[in-house]
Structures are given as structure tokens and as C-alpha cells.
Image (cartoon, rainbow, N blue to C red):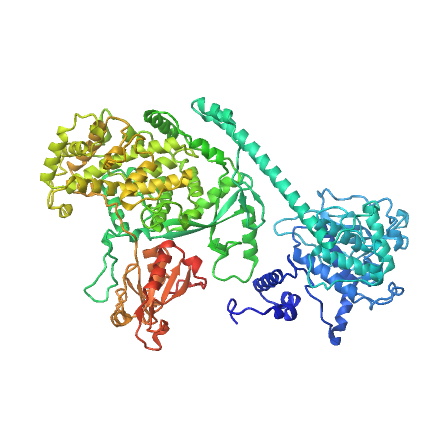
Amino acid sequence: MQQGMYTPKAEVWDQEFDPVMVILRTVYRRDVQSAMDRYTAFLKQSGKFPGNPWPPYKKRTPLHPSYKGLMRLLHCKTLHIVLFTLLYKILMDHQNLSEHVLCMVLYLIELGLENSADEESDEEALVCGPERCHDSWFPGSNLVSNMRHFINYVRVRVPETAPEVKRDSPASTSSDSLGSLQNSGTAQVFSLVAERRKKFQEIINRSSSEAHQVVRPRTSNKWSAPGSAPQLTTAILEIKESILSLLIKLHHKLSGKQNSYYPPWLDDIEILIQPEIPKYSHGDGITAVERILLKAALQSRMNKRIIEEICRKVTPPVPPKKITAAEKKTLDKEERRQKARERQQKLLAEFASRQKSFMETAMDVDSPENDIPMEITTAEPQVSEAVYDCVICGQSGPSSEDRPTGLVVLLQASSVLGQCRDNIEPKKLPITEEEQIYPWDTCAAVHDVRLSLLQRYFKDSSCLLAVSIGWEGGVYVQTCGHTLHIDCHKSYMESLRNDQVLQGFSVDKGEFTCPLCRQFANSVLPCYPGSNVENNLWQRPSNKSIQDLIKEVEELQGRPGAFPSETNLSKEMESVMKDIKNTTQKKYRDYSKTPGSPDNDFLFMYSVARTNLELELIHRGGNLCSGGASTAGKRSCLNQLFLVLALHMRLYSIDSEYNPWRKLTQLVEEMNSQLGNEEQQPEVPILYHDVTSLLLVQILMMPQPLRKDHFTCIVKVLFTLLYTQALAALSVKCTEEDRSAWKRTGALKKNTCDAEKSYEVLLSFVISELAKGKLYHEEGTQECAMVSPIAWSPESMEKYLQDFCLPFLRITSLLQHHLFGEDLPSCQEEEEFSVLSSCLGLLPTFYQTEHPFISASCLDWPVPAFDIISQWCFEINSFTERHAEQGKALLIQESRWKLPHLLQLPENYNTIFQYYHRKTCSVCTKVPKDPAVCLVCGTFVCLKGLCCKQQSYCECVLHSQNCGAGTGIFLLINASVIIIIRGHRFCLWGSVYLDAHGEEDRDLRRGKPLYICKERYKVLEQQWISHTFDHINKRWGPHYNGL
């Protein structure tokens, strides 16, 4: 019977299901929990019990006569000692005793009372045979009499530094008024040592002169914790408790209020004459304790008297108000809720006051001007701390330095971005010898060629600031949205590590499933403490000019960053940063010519942010026309990820002389000094920089949280560079006749008032400046094939400029959405540029929208436009004097990548089978026994082929690391099924080829014609793009590098 397909009927749950047998006889703990969850759901749906039931769950069936002898164990002094010890430890909140232990203790006590001796008078004399345990804990072996026996003192082995150690024996060990009822003039001292007790007996008389004792033999084994040797000493602790008194105090603890237990027979004596013990099918701990105390009073008049004496001692005999059981339960719940609310409000108020005082102090010290702290103190906003719910302990509260809260996240390496192409049509799976796939036009290949070209001619450290990596092997971070305390997570991992039955993931590698939704994860991303008021303060608009903001940005970036003090939060941030680095292979994060250079770490960290932003853009369909927050956006962890990356990037510093911010906002008097000499390689020209990479570097180098006006200032400055790059690339694409025409047209408008915001004037000036070098002299290159033979019109030029700038505006809008929580507006596709530029603050407020939109109207030059453009073009001309062809190739940046797709498959599976089942492997030149083909790049591989094994990795596993950074999608030719490889695990996904009836033919046993199911193939592609293989597919297993 498969779980989820069939459900037991109501009468089966009610009559046949035995929870105790399931608990005692089931092998796996998860099966017990699953059965009890479904049983509890049945009780709630049927209205029999609203909460979580306790043993015995239902009325016990009569015991078979053959097993009557087992009941003698319930009247064993050794068992009573264990029950007393467990009750005492549970009452004292021992950390290793769970609620399940308490359930079993109460269950055994109740079972012993139901099977006790009938005659009370002889219960002290009845001894069920000689016991081998000679401890004098209790006078007899009958549970009914032992429940009222008081134990005054115990002897324990504790560390010498324990505060509760009682060094000296008590001067008088006489029993109190309650203990004198059953003790015969002596009080006992017993041992509660956790180890198995040997022969040990000690009796202390009321008079210390009469005390005599039997010492434990010297051969007793001593236990010590591994790696430690605590000095233990024997101490005498005062207990003065009995099982009955412990049960009454346990009732007080479970109910959450003092004096909660009141003997019911004091109000109605008929309860003892005709006890109406309910059908205890269900109930909680309070009802279980009440049942036990009632049964103990029914079986022994002395127990009844002891219970009354204990209750009178705890509280004066005030007759309580008689209420029903339902009202009592409701009042208890309301009282507990009220106390929980009061504790939570007190905690939040304390955190709010601390946050407010910290903000006022920080703003007084760090603010460069005095107007901002004055605004804060006069406004006096109410601090609202971000509150997180821990899914393990259930507590709600803010994340703090000492006890941080984290998001459950999955870190995985991804090469999905690297499979983007500039062609809308997806590549087809080769089915003939003439058809081949060459990865020259992929996004990853183009960026690798560009980085290699830059490192060939320019300084290595400057090259690593001019590009982004992560197109192959980038780290993608996703979350289920649930949070937990870091210390709770560590305890949870320890429990998983101790569990012997683990399937599908490796705890040693940090893998686990979310305790709430069971989604696969492998790390916890700390939530940085912050408040909503703090974010609102940074979003306040200011009236400062762009020149003042530029100076502030430069000053803030120049301040050296310091990692926070040694707190639990800082340790976890270091830990998660190591997890991010270890997620991908070293070859995907080490691009410097100098191994171990800090430039590698700097490049890797801001590229992680770039990878996650680009992937979210792909998940939204490649544009932001729909606006709002997608499903992925609602569960985004990018805000917390940016804070972690920013704190680590602030530990690095860029020399102010080489900071790109200076080249963007300042004019250099002696430009020749910036070019270097023949012996030293020059810096990368600013027009060769990737503007999105510059944006992330500038943002993450700023102190966090970032002010909104500083963010807008950085975006405005970078947009001027991006627009100049677009004009330069357009000039290269134009013919010589077009360049001459636009150069003349723009020169006539140069002296107008809005010349700096006219793309015609700016294009004319860029062409005239670049013409001073040799950039336009090298014709016949590959780029010339891209030149259109038709003259460019103003409309086509405007569309090209907008398409060139759109990818930057999309990433910047997403970044603003995550940093400041601003909603993304929805729009039509043709209005996307204008809407995003207005959302980012690039458009002036007085801009008239009824006129045709001009992209140059978004420009806001920090310095005179023609001077800064001339400075940027001078760097290009100096490089093209020696390398004109390479200079033109670097200037043309392809930024309009299409969405990634898997290879397009043929309609009939027979076409694939006939070509591949006899195809020879390119590595071993043999026909594989189990051929497979990669659906991402079309590579033909040997499944489980030892002939192609390299460094203990079979070919499929090795190809998944090279092609997908650990993720591989392979079609098994001889089985028509698809296999997924994810890191050290694999699973069978299914088949995308079905017969005429819509059924699979695994292993091709039936020989039916198979046809492509486009719906299934689209689902497979969507899971690959959204990185949800780990969440959707559940049947994973280790491949041990053997595929």
C-alpha cells in the first residue's frame, strides 16, 4: 500500500489502530511520527480531541493470560526508582528528557495502578520474590504504597564546583509530618548516579550518632565525559519528595499556574464511591496526572490522605469555585496565551529601546552633517524591529548579535547563465554527422574570451574589476522563506547526524531539509539586525546637488571597513561566506594570473550578487514588464545576501588612485600619466568596463545600509558611461558614410543649450574623438560583417541605444527593489525603458511624457560632458594605436542575450535512437554499452563507462561538472529516460518521449513508436532554469562518481 494513495477509514483509526504498538514496534522514527500525525489529524477532524493525545490513547484491551507475569515488573523497586528519578528530572527541567519520556512514565505508573494488589493491608508485607537490587529506596515492592513514600535525601556524584553540593551531612534527617506517616523512625539516603548501580545501601538514623552505612565497593566503574576529567565528589542533596508530591507539582507545571490541582473528592464524595473515570481514549498530560492521582486515592485511603495533606501544605484550604472541565481548559489556555503575549511584548520593547539608543548614538558620531540627527530626534519615529519566527523552537523575535536568526537557503553552483545565446531559435540536438554544436556563441564563451583579451593587454588587477564572472559555476542562493535560530539549527543538525536512517542527503556536507516545509537546503544565511525605521531614514530624499553626493560617495568608499566584533553573528557570516566559496569549484572563482590573489575573492563576491540578479531576471521572463514581485521574489534572500557580501567586501580596499569612481567623476589634468609605459601594463580604459559590474562594486563598497540618494547618484553617474559606450559601439557598427553624415549633423547643434542631452551631438563628438586614433581605420574584420548596408535612421538609432542600456536598467531596478523595498511598476514592452528610468530617478521631474521619448534626456553629467568624453576616448585611442583590431572587438559588447533553453529534440525518438545507439565515443573510440547525450550542450558520453574514466570520475559525472558546474541532464539512448545529476546525487527524472497512448516505454521493452511530449520537456526545462531539481524530485541517491 503506497502512502498517499489509500487512507484508512474512520472505524479503522477508532478501533484497529494501536498507537502504543506502533511506538514500540516500528523500526524507523519517521514512520512513528507520520502515523501519529495522521492519527492526530483524524481526532481533530472527527471532533474527538482538539490537541495532541497522550498515552494510552484509547481503552486498553484485556491482556492475554500468558503475559500476566509481565505485570510483576510494574511492582519492582528498581522500576520505581527509575520512575522517581525521571519524574524528578522532568520537574527540574532536565535538558535531555523530552515529552515522550514523560508520556511513557505516566503510562507505566497508570498501568501499575490498574494491576496492583487487591488487598491494601498486606501490601507492605508482599514481596514478589527477592530482588537483586538491594537499594533501600522504598520499603516494599507494591507501587500503591511506594507512591506515598517520601525520600528525604539522596547521595549523588557531582563536580566539586557544583553550587548545589551539600558538603556536610544534615544534622538531623528526621522525616517531616508527612514522612512520619510511613517511615519507621529512619530516613534513607540514596544514590541517583546515572550508571548502573552496584550493591549500595546507606541508612542514616534520626540521630547522627546512630548512623551507619554500607559503602559502595571500590570496584564500581566511574564514567567521565570524553576529553575531560572532572573531579567528582559525593554530595548529599535534599529531596523530600514522593511520587505523589512529584505528580502534584508536575500538574502545576503543565497547567502553567500554581495550586492548579484540587482533589475532586473534596467537593463530591460520590467520586470515590462510584468513580466515573472517563473513557480515557485521549487527553493531555494534565488529564493523565489527574487520572493517576484519582486511581491512587481510590486504591488506598492513606494515599488519599497524603494527597490532601500535600495540597493543604502547598495552599491554604480555600474552597475553589466549581467550574466545568471545559471552562477550566479554556481558562488555562487563555492564561498561557496572555503570559506569552506579555513576555513577547516585553522582549520587543527592550529591543526597540536598544535599537533607538544605538541609532541616535551612531548618527551623532558618523553623520558628516548635523541636520540628519536633528531630523531623527525631532521626528522620534516608533522603532519597528524586524521579527522572525524560528521554525524549530517556535519563538518569535528579532535577530541579534548574540543569538542571530538565519534564512534556510540552498547554495548551488549554476551554469544556466552561460547557456544564454544571442539567437532566439534554440539549438537542435545533432542527429546527423553534418550537424554539430559549437559553444562559441554562448554567453560564457564570449565573456571568457573578453576577459582573456583584457588580461593580455592590461594590468591584471584592473581587469578583474572590469568584468563579472559566474556565467559558468556561479553561486545561486535560494530560500524557502523560513527562518530559524542559528543555535537551533546546530542542534537540529546534531539530531540528524545521530539519526542512523538518512536518505537523499549528506549531513556531513551540511545538507538538511527545512524542519517546516522539508525543502532541501545546505546552509543558513544570517539575518542582519535592522529596523524598518532605519530603512525609512536612508530613503528620505535630500536636496543636495549631485556634486555634493559624489564627494560623499568618494569619502564613504575611502573609509576602511572593519569587520564587526567577535560575536555569534560575525562568526556565522564568516561561515556562510566559506560555504558560498566552497559551493563552486576553484576553477570557476580563480581567474587571476597570481594564484591566491585577494583580487580573486573581490571579483568572486560581487559576481555572486550579479549571478543572483541575472537569474532572477531570467525567472521573470527576461524583462520587468510584468512588475511586482514574482513567486521567486516573494521568497528572495538577496537583501540578506547583499549585506553579507558588503560586509566582506568592505574588508578590501581599492587604491584611490585606481578607483574607477575618480575616472567617472573627475577630470585628469595629465592623461598621459594614466596610460603607463611600455614596461608596465596600463589600466583598463573606462569604456571597456562592464557597467553593471561597476555598479555592484560601487554599491557593495559603500557602508550598509545604503542611502537612497547615494544609490541614485551612483546610477546617474554610471548611466553617463553606459550611454557613451552605446554611442561608441553604434559608431563602430555604422558605415563610414553614416559616420561622416552624423558627424556633420551633430556639429551644427553643438552650441545649443541642450547639447549635452542630445544623442546627435554626443554621437558626433564621440565619432570625432575616436577618429583621432586608428579605431575606424581597420576594415575587413569580423565586426565589419555586422555593419548594416542600409543607412541608420533616427528611430533605429534610438532603439539601438535603448536596447543597449536596457539590461543595465533592469538589473539596477531589481537591485533597488531588494535594497529599498520599492515595487516594480508594470508596463508595456515598448515603454519599459522610460518606466524603469523614471523609477530609478534618471528622468527629471519636469519631463514632458507627451513628446516622443528620447533616451538622452536621462543624462545628468557630473562634469562637462565633452571634457569627460574626450578623456575616456583618449584612453581608447592610445590603445588602438597599437592594437586597433582588439580595440574594436572590446568596444562592441553584446548585452542582449536571449533566455537559455535546452536543446530542441526531434519529434520521433527513432531518429535519435538510430543515430546514437551505434555512435562511437570521441574519447575511447568505442561504441558505448549505455550511451547518453547531454541535453544542454549535445555532448555524447558513455554512461558508467570505465574506458572513459578520469581521476576516479566516470564520464557523465565529469561532464556534469564541466558543463553545468555539477548539474547534468542526460538522455539515456537505450532506455529513453532522462537522468539528472546534482553534485554527489542523481535521480531518474522520467521520459519526455511517450507512445500514442501517452505512456512511457522505459528500456524500450515494448518497442512502441515514441513521440516527443512538449509539455514534459517544457517542465524539465523550467526546472533546470529555476534550479528546482532538488525540491521537486524526491528519489535521490548517491552515484559515487560511477555514472
- Of residues 739 and 933, the one nearer the viewer is 739
- Image quarter of residue 435: bottom left
Residue farthest to the left, as pictured: 737
Residue farthest to the front, as pictured: 850
Quadrant location, the C terminus: bottom left
Instruction: Tell whether 263 sits left or right of 563.
Output: right
- Image quarter of residue 708: top left
| Residue 881 in view in this figure | yes
Indicate whether 785 appears above or below 687. Answer: below
Q: Position of residue 161 (x, y in %)?
A: 70, 42
Indicate whether 933 appears above or below 602. Answer: below
Q: Position of residue 639 (x, y in %)?
A: 43, 42
Indicate whether 909 appears above or below 844. Answer: below
Residue at (35% x, 44% y) in the render: 826
Q: Position of residue 730 (x, y in %)?
A: 18, 40
- Of residues 196 and 419, the one nearer the viewer is 419
- Of residues 998 and 811, the one nearer the viewer is 998
Residue at (54% x, 29% y) in the render: 357
- Of residues 753 and 730, the one nearer the viewer is 753
Indicate whether 689 appears above or below 615. Answer: above
Residue farthest to the top, as pictured: 370
Q: Position of residue 737 (x, y in %)?
A: 9, 39
Residue at (15% x, 33% y) in the render: 764
| Residue 465 in view in this figure | no
Residue at (65% x, 61% y) in the render: 48
